[in-house]
Image (cartoon, rainbow, N blue to C red):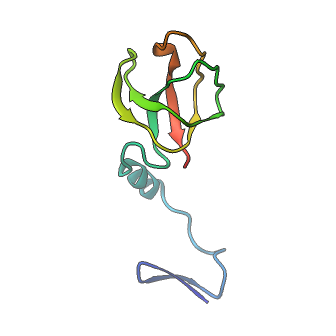
Amino acid sequence: MAFISNGTTIATGGSLQNVPAPSNSQILTGVASAGAGVVGSYGLVRAHSSQYVSAGSNATGTLTFCSVKGGTSGTSCSGTWRVMGALNGATPFNEQLNTVMLRIS
């Protein structure tokens, strides 16, 4: 069996054991080319919720991109995002509901 990517044979013999790992340059180029809001991207996001959400939890629902000072862009963040900071559930909604999130799906 051959493993072919974009017309180039990567490996033969039914095993991927000898395929080299991507270089740091290849990984960083891929990350740098990702658009805002795509799976694998990070964003400063506001959760419109009054619940406390801890780091590592997943967030869905009404999410928008925001600024450090608390203003939102009005652009919704679709999908599921992993909270990389924490949201303390402050009311009324303010900068304490803004944190860095990673889009996971």
Q: Is residue 43 above or below residue 29?
A: above
Q: Quadrant of residue 71?
A: top left
- Relative to 81, 34 lies left or right: left
Decide which of 75, 55 is in the foreground and name it. Answer: 75
Decide which of 88, 3 is in the foreground and name it. Answer: 88
Q: Is residue 76 above or below residue 7?
A: above
- Relative to 74, 21 lies left or right: right
Q: Quadrant of residue 67?
A: top left
Residue 100 screen position, x and y as percent: 50, 29
Q: Quadrant of the N terminus?
A: bottom right
Residue shown at 42% from the left, 31% from the top: 64
Q: Is residue 46 above or below residue 37?
A: above
Residue shown at 50% from the left, 24% from the top: 48
Residue shown at 63% from the left, 20% from the top: 51
Decide which of 85, 105 is in the foreground and name it. Answer: 105
Residue 34 screen position, x and y as percent: 38, 50
Residue shown at 49% from the left, 32% from the top: 62
Residue projecting furthest to the left = 73
